[in-house]
Image (cartoon, grey):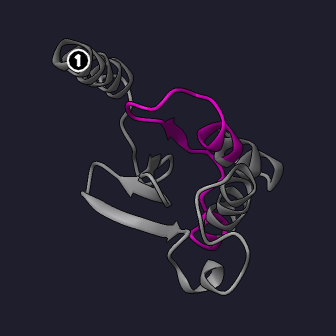
Amino acid sequence: MENSQHRTQNCRRKRAMRVRKGVRGTREKPRLSVVKSNKHVYVQLIDDEQAVTLGFTSTLSKDFRETSNNKKSVEAGRQLGVRIAELAKQKNVTTVVFDRGPFKYHGVVAAVADGARGSGLKL
């Protein structure tokens, strides 16, 4: 059993390094980072040159706490994509670089990207 856990962790680490080695955010084109845990999803707009977060939202934020989208789901991911696109428009950002990290582009991660694209953000 321990061998399979090491293999899974090693694959995740390799995937994260492969994805992130070419992804850098700037002020005009920040990095849209998606992190998911067992219960929640977190989305950030990051300027890597200045090392600042331009915008942040998650299923734990006030907007989602009282709704049915307060847990990790595809619909919650889509709503997070819409919300982060609104935050990006407030910062005059139209194009972002998508950073999925060690997660496969599937399910919740794909829903975040689709929600952001549907709201006018270019990925």
In the image, residue 35 lies at what x, y percent? 43, 49
In the image, residue 59 above or below residue 120: below
Amino acid type for the residue under numbered disc 1: Met
Task: From the viewer's perspective, tell me whether residue 19 is left or right of residue 89.
Answer: left
Q: Quadrant of the N terminus?
A: top left
Magenta segment range?
Answer: 87-111
Q: Label 1 belongs to which residue?
A: 1
Q: Quadrant of the C terminus?
A: top right
Q: Residue at x 73, y 74 (%)?
A: 68
Q: Residue at x 38, y 30 (%)?
A: 102
Task: From the viewer's perspective, tell me whether residue 122 is left or right of residue 27.
Answer: right
Residue 69 on the magenta span: no
In the image, residue 70 above or below residue 118: below
Q: Residue at x 45, y 50 (%)?
A: 36
Residue sitting at the far right: 118
- The local secondary structure at tag 1 comes to loop
Q: Quadrant of residue 114?
A: top right
In the image, residue 12 lies at what x, y percent? 32, 24
